Amino acid sequence: MQKLQATRYGFISQRGTEDAFYDLMTHIYKELNLKKIILMMSLDIEGAFDNAWWPALETQLRAQNCPVNLHGMVRGYLRDRELVVRYAGEQCRKRTSKGCIQGSIAGPTFWNLSLDSLLREIGELVLYVRAFAVDMVLMFSGQLASWIEEDANHALARVHY
C-alpha cells in the first residue's frame, strides 16, 4: 500500500499534536516573512467516525493497492453490521453501512484511509492543508485578499462536495 498523505497528524505514530503545531507555526512564519496576507481556516469534521462511508473506504483500499487478504478482511469486518439497542426489555436492530467504531483498533486507520483522498484533492487547491485526527487546517496566502478569498471559497466548495 502507498503511504498516507504526509499532511496527516494524529492516529499516526510519531506525528502528534506538538509536531502538527510546529509544522503549522513554521509555515505561518515563512509566509509572514514573505510579507503575505494569510487566511487560515480550521475545520472540524462533524460526526467523522459516525459518517465514514464504507464504499469510499473500499475505494481507497483499492486505490492504495491493499493486499487482497487485508482487503477481504476489511470487507468481512464491514459486512452485515448492525446496531442493536436493548432498553426496558425491548430490542431494536438496524443495519448500518457507514461509520468507524470509535475506540476500536481499526477505527483510526479506516478514518485515515477515508480522509486521504480528500487531502490529496484539497492539497492541489490549497497552499497548506493539514489534518489532525478529525480536524483540518487550510491556509491560503498571497498579496491580494480578493484572490485569497476566491481560492478559499473554491477549496471549501470541494470540501463540502
Image (spheres, rainbow, N blue to C red):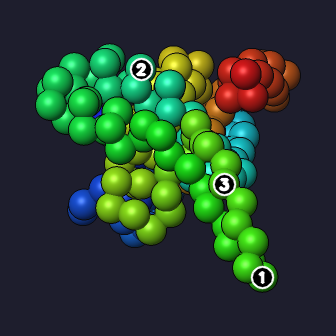
Q: Secondary structure at mark 3?
A: strand
Where in the figure is residue 33, as x and y percent of width and height? 53, 44
N-term-proximal mark, 2 vs 3: 2
Q: Which residue is mark 2?
A: 59
The disc label shown at residue 5, or none: none
Observer-nearest of 76 and 141: 76
Q: Is residue 2 above or below residue 90?
A: above
Q: CA distance from mark 3 to mark 1?
A: 15 Å
Q: Which residue is mark 3?
A: 93
At a point 34% along the width and 33% down the height, the residue shown is 75
Q: Which residue is mark 1?
A: 88
Q: CA distance from mark 2 to mark 1?
A: 40 Å
The quadrant in which the C terminus is found is: top right
Observer-nearest of 27 and 106: 106
N-term-proximal mark, 2 vs 1: 2
90 sits left or right of 28 in the view: right
At a point 31% along the width and 18% down the height, the residue shown is 62
Where in the figure is residue 103, as x and y percent of width and height? 44, 68
Question: To which quarter of the image does residue 20 belong?
Answer: bottom left
Q: Residue furthest front?
A: 89
Specify whether residue 110 is in view: yes
At a point 27% along the width and 23% down the height, the residue shown is 64
Amino acid beneath label 3: Arg
Instruction: Name the mark nearer the viewer: 2 or 1.
Output: 1
Where in the figure is residue 89, as x and y percent of width and height? 73, 79
Q: Secondary structure at mark 1?
A: loop
Q: Residue furthest right?
A: 146
N-term-proximal mark, 3 vs 1: 1
